[in-house]
Image (tube, rainbow, N blue to C red):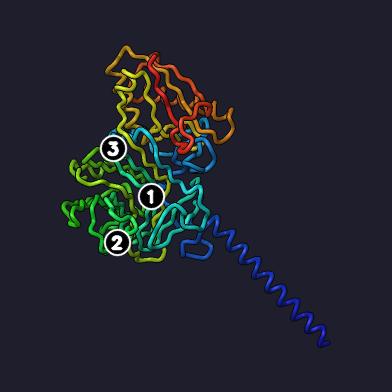
Amino acid sequence: MKKIWALTGMLCLALLSHSQILKRMSDRAQRRVEYNLGKKVDKSVDDAMSGKKKPKKTTNGNSSGNGTSNGSTASGGGGSSSGPSLKSYSKFDFVPGEKVIVMEDFSQDAVGDFPGKWNTNSTGEIVTLDGQPGKWLSLSKDGVFMPEFITSLPENFTLEFELMCNPDYSFYSMPFHVYLADLKNRKEFSNYKLFGTAKREGVEFFVKPMDASLKVGETGFKIWSGGKETMKNLTKTSQFHAKTSNYVKVSMWRQKQRLRVYLNQEKVMDVPRAFDESHTYNTLLFMTGRTHSDNDRYIISNIRLAVGAPDTRHKLINEGKFVTSGILFDVNSAAIRGESYGVLKEIAGVLKENGSVKVKIVGHTDSDGDEAFNMELSKKRAEAVKAALVKEFGIDGGRMETDGKGEREPVDNKVKANNRRVEFIKL
């Protein structure tokens, strides 16, 4: 009898141990796809980040996911736009830089890790979101976060990224900050924390998804010179509000001393003397502060840094070709994203000024996915661009031909975003 009880006990221990192992495996697997935001054990990041206006699939590319290596993103043929229409961006004059030098979508990092090419004095975690392709960096702790691979912010650049927060983000939690800094010693980046000791040099932009009224968000900026705050402003915005619109596309555009900032299609900052010509701006920093709730966090992805001011007219009329990676499309679609309006407006303006000029519009993709599919996709995207120029800007369709080259003519082996482009060739 004692042997039976002993065997029974050993069996129970074995079953308990086995169940614990299975539970740990299950928890690990669930964390990889869901990532609990602290509300309930069965609540994922998808639930906690869901908001009334969270868009689906927002970027341009031709592979599965919001991003793959070197910034490749998903796209396909046909379908209608899931994001804002071109018309809603009619006052949007943002034009992305000519050449993409950084496209950070965290595709090289494992879910659950802090990204390997970044540094921080805090912590963060790569997560995935339901309905959103690709990977995102979740930030819930007070800290400074530096992409180490960005070492120059030249006289002409554009910076874009996507930002989300949880829909119950508290007014008492801190804003999300972006610093465009002149850092003499990059090892001291953590001194830029909210109440740090840094002698700040640069431009600070911030956005908060809840103001004191709880009805809108707020945004603002500070200019720092010689460690002193020399200019600042604060304003309200409906573009980023936790309860009604917990997603925002941030676009920043430097032209020498001038800085413009857009939240979705709204221009919230246009400062002609933001940058000091005597400084060399070399560091991009993101900063978060204390949170009122353990659930409060920001999530970022699809950081796109491009350089050069496009000279559309000179390149098309005098050089015979204008090339842009700034026309964006929905994932798995040839539908043009609303934020492409500024680029299309520039091109339409050149065509209106030069009424006798005819062009061929040629679409290109990167090499991810099926070659035949990419070829068809590139043709559909060129046709979509032509249709937009006719419908939105009144350009005569007879002046435009279209074609697509698929993945056959890459121009960049490092940053695939430069291969996903549209060419306008003077005929």
| Whole-number angstrom distance, CA of label 3 to CA of label 2 | 27 Å
Above/below status of 422 relative to 97? above
Q: Residues within 10 Å of mark 1 (few under 14, many from 20)?
A: many
Single out the mark in the foreground, 2 or 1. 2
| Label 1 element class | strand
Q: Amino acid at mark 3?
A: Asn
Instruction: Quickly name the residue at label 3.
Output: 156
Q: Position of residue 413 (x, y in %)?
A: 49, 35
Image quarter of the C terminus: top left
Q: Amino acid at mark 2?
A: Asn
For image coordinates 19% across by 45% down, the residue present is 278
Q: Which mark is residue 163?
A: 1
| Whole-number angstrom distance, CA of label 1 to CA of label 3 | 23 Å
Above/below status of 144 relative to 305? below
Single out the mark in the foreground, 1 or 3. 3
| Whole-number angstrom distance, CA of label 2 to CA of label 1 | 24 Å
| Label 2 element class | helix
Whether pointer 2 and pointer 1 mark residues with C-beta atoms closer than 8 Å, the reply is no
Q: Which mark is residue 191?
A: 2
